[in-house]
Image (spheres, rainbow, N blue to C red):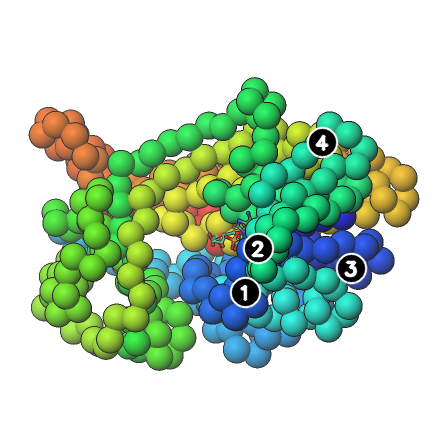
Amino acid sequence: MVILGAGPAGLVLGNLLLASGVDCVILERATRTQVQARSRAGFLAANTVRILDRHGLAEGLHRRGREHTTCEFRTEDGRFRLDYGSLGRGERHTVYPQHELVTDLLTQYLNTGGRVRFGTEALTVRGADDARPSVTVREADGRTGSWQGRYVVGCDGRHGAARRSLPPGAVRRHRLDHGISWLGLLAEAPPSLDAVGYAVHHRGFAGHMARTPEVTRYYLQCERGTSPDAMSDGRIWDELALRMRAEDYGPLRRGRIVDRTVVDLESDVLEPLRHGALFLAGDAASLLSPSAAKGANLAVLEAEILARALIDDLCHGSPEGLAGYSQRCLAHIWRAQEFSQWMVRLLHGAPGPDGESVFHDSLRRSRLASLSTSRSCQDWFADHYVGV
Ligand code: APR
């Protein structure tokens, strides 16, 4: 079995296959240090924790992760809080930085004899229609090589080799550009509030998400094409304070900004998630806008579904799980896409001509009003916000 990519999808899959005695290798373009240092998401859904628990992969997150149950909306009409941990099914998030989860998964995989080839870039997947597909690679020293397996699983993200290798027409790609961009920031500063903060402002969205007691993630909506370095740290903090209405609701705890990335909010879904002996999981299967922090959670869910199906096929001769993999995951993916899209519309005005903007702004405002006043709307929100 050849797995491309050592992110959450590839590493959960690798651990589960290894635990069932399925021989596999993970090919990873980056170095081990880079993989363990990459700062990404950090909100794990209750179901993700259950999956990791089931397979003995949750020790680190139970020790160092923190439960999270509240979000706060700040708008032109005031602010309101939702304690989603006591709404709907009452499920909670665990805040655990993704690079720590990746480090735990990698350590467990390597300690139980798993193989990872770091610094090995997959170039092309060949022969997915055959019984023995192969992956051509460029090794860290520049030499090219090839790996063969019964199956190849692309967990190598949206720009990986798995997507690139799909022959034209084999798989459809459904894509939505939300026309919105965020400047994602990582600040060496303690959280400024004990909740996820969503600020809706006429200058654009601003977001606050706790990571650790020392590090906080912020988002600022920006013009498409903005350079991450366009604003000084001081300007960024002033803009965050303005949009988060710090004057009314309390100051932000400022610190050095250690990471800046501009993200264009885009979503896509590949369909089906299989071409012959090549399977797709995680970001390689579907890209979610970061509005609802579902990406890593879906990646873990898909990896578990695929691992079970592969084990049934390879160890017990039952191919039904593999045949149904795509359909089963797509049902989860479209539900996550639907909620992420709903969040995008909740948090932003629509770009467009003035009349259209007023219309969309009014819809957004009334959606927020329903969320702040209707218990059934809040229960629905809570279930979708934490669920995958
Ligand atoms: N060859 C080998 N490895 C590759 C290649 C390639 N051609 N292209 C990408 N990779 C590696 C990347 O270096 C990365 O380590 O694949 C890995 C993909 O990991 P992630 O991007 O983390 O994707 P995934 O495991 O699907 O996790 C889902 O959800 O929170 C979101 O985007 C966030 O990473 C998260 C994702």
Does residue 157 appear in the picture of this structure? yes
Element on which disc 2 rests: loop
Q: Secondary structure at mark 1?
A: loop
Q: Which residue is mark 3?
A: 18
Distance from disc 3 to disc 1, alpha carbons, whole Å, reads 22 Å
Q: What residue is rendered at 14% in x and 65% in y?
A: 232
Q: Residue at x 67, y 67 (%)?
A: 57
354 to 343, vertically: above or below: above
Sequence-earlier tag: 3 or 1: 3
Q: Nearer the viewer, residue 318 or 387?
A: 318
Q: Which residue is mark 2?
A: 142
Labels 4 and 2: the sequence-earlier one: 4
Q: Residue furthest top?
A: 169
Tell me the CA gap for discs 4 and 1.
28 Å
The amino acid pointed to by label 4 is Gly
Q: Nearer the viewer, mark 4 or mark 2?
A: 2
Q: Nearer the viewer, residue 68 or 294?
A: 294
Give the structural element (helix, strand or loop) at label 4.
loop
Amino acid on which the number 2 mark rests in the picture: Gly
Q: Which mark is residue 31?
A: 1
Residue that mark 4 sits on:
127
- Secondary element at tag 3: helix
Give the mark nearest the N terminus, 3 or 2: 3
Label 2: few (<14), some (14–19) or many (≥20) C-alpha neighbours in 10 Å: few
